[in-house]
Amino acid sequence: MKYSKLFPKTLKQAPANAESINHQLLARAGYIHQEMAGAYTYLPLGWKVLNKISDIVREEMDAIGGQEIVMPALQSSEAWKKTGRYDSVDVLYKLKGAGDSDLVLGPTHEEIVYPLAAEYVNSYKDLPLYLYQIQVKFRNEARAKAGLLRGREFLMKDLYSFHSNDEDRDKYYEEVRKAYLKIFRRIGLPVVETKAGGGTFSALSQEFQTLTPSGEDIVYICSKCSHAVNQEIMEGKVCPECGGEVKGEKAIEVGNIFPLKRAFAETFNLTFTDSNGQDTIVSAGCYGLGISRVMGALVEVFHDEKGIIWPESVAPFQVHLLGLGLEEESVKREAERVYKLLQAEGVEVLFDDREDASAGAKFADADLIGIPLRAVVSKRNEGKQENKKRSDKETSFLSLDEFIKKSMIH
């Protein structure tokens, strides 16, 4: 991709309404544009990052037997009234449809997936069943001022598992827990497994929290055994596991898994005929992961005074190629040659081909955008590729072949 063609260009100043670090940097670097509080347009760079996060999540959900579907965001209120959540969920968007019908915009999808499963699950032979989606959710948050961390419209992965008994569900719950840890390792986002309350869904749940001073949650972590508990269920001032000293840390919740109470299955008559011919209630679990929230959390954790520092696995491009002094035809030809060679090797490249931008402006934009590897083609480099990792301070010089090999590793 040539930067001269990329929409849009960077901003020198963050928007006046950008309070959080992730909103400020993502807006300045051209990843997102706020349409209103809690709702964003994902610009080309931002959409690339979201897709890379989604692809990692999708691969790991498929690996544990998940089948991907997409359920409607626009939902009838009937199922929500049936569960009692039409009036109890305070962030629910309520709409009026044709014929004065009551509609909602889905903040979650239990009210859709349970009736769906009830229609197709009849026998123990139909279980277990694992359905997931990556889809936009809507929550009417009273305070949506934290960029992608607290949106009114956001991208989420939600997986629902259905089982013939609690034992099988608990076994799968452990598989999902391990899959989540693998997802966050692949993305490059550090997380702390945290015990938490389940609210309306279950007695307990497990959160995946990223520690950062900008977080809205408080997680208490034991200095002795590293056991972590959410503030909501923390009792006393010592670790419930070993009695060690605990310390409160601010954190961002990026994932949450929990067994679902039987009430949903009972409400929607989600039963099956077991091997003995008995009508039996289905056991279920729910597993959420905030795709767009992960994107915001990454920026909160990985940035410096100059801009974003993306982990290699989710960066929009692998290499940011800067051409300096492109008004000289020989330099321009060499920069174009390097660009095409990298592309031919399958390396994702953003090529700053602007002839009217200074070297300082190009370096500043590269730091702000945060692509992992920067390369420079200029007259003074004498055929060598000047390169630097965004996370490093030192610059090195490599031959073109050496640089291409390094780019392919990244």
Image: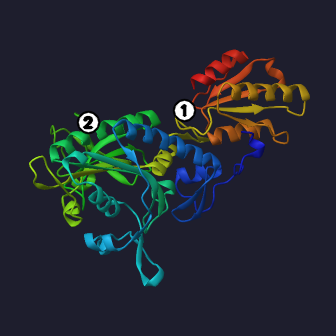
The count of marks equals 2
Report how far apart the C-alphas of labels 1 and 2 lie in the structure.
Answer: 28 Å
- State whether residue 188 appears in this view: no
Report the disc number at residue 298. Answer: none
Task: Give how far across and how far down residue 293 sits, in percent.
Answer: 46, 51
Task: Give how far across and how far down residue 300 sits, in percent.
Answer: 49, 46
Which residue is drawn at the image coordinates 44% and 33% (left, top)? 186
SS at mark 1 in the image: loop
Position above or below: 325 against 137: above
Which residue is drawn at the image coordinates 73% and 24% (left, top)? 341
| Image position of 277 (left or right of 204) | left
Q: Which residue is mark 2?
A: 226
Q: State the residue lying farthest toward the bottom.
A: 100
Q: Which residue is mark 1?
A: 312
Task: Give how far across and how far down residue 187 sits, in percent.
Answer: 46, 37
- State whether residue 216 appears in this view: yes
Crowding near the residue tagged with mark 2, few <14, some 14–19, many ≥20 C-alpha atoms within 10 Å: some
Task: Give how far across and how far down residue 403 sits, in percent.
Answer: 67, 20
**Picture quarter with the C terminus:** top right
Nearest to viewer (mark 1 / mark 2): 1
| Image position of 289 (left or right of 348) | left
Amino acid, disc 2: Ser
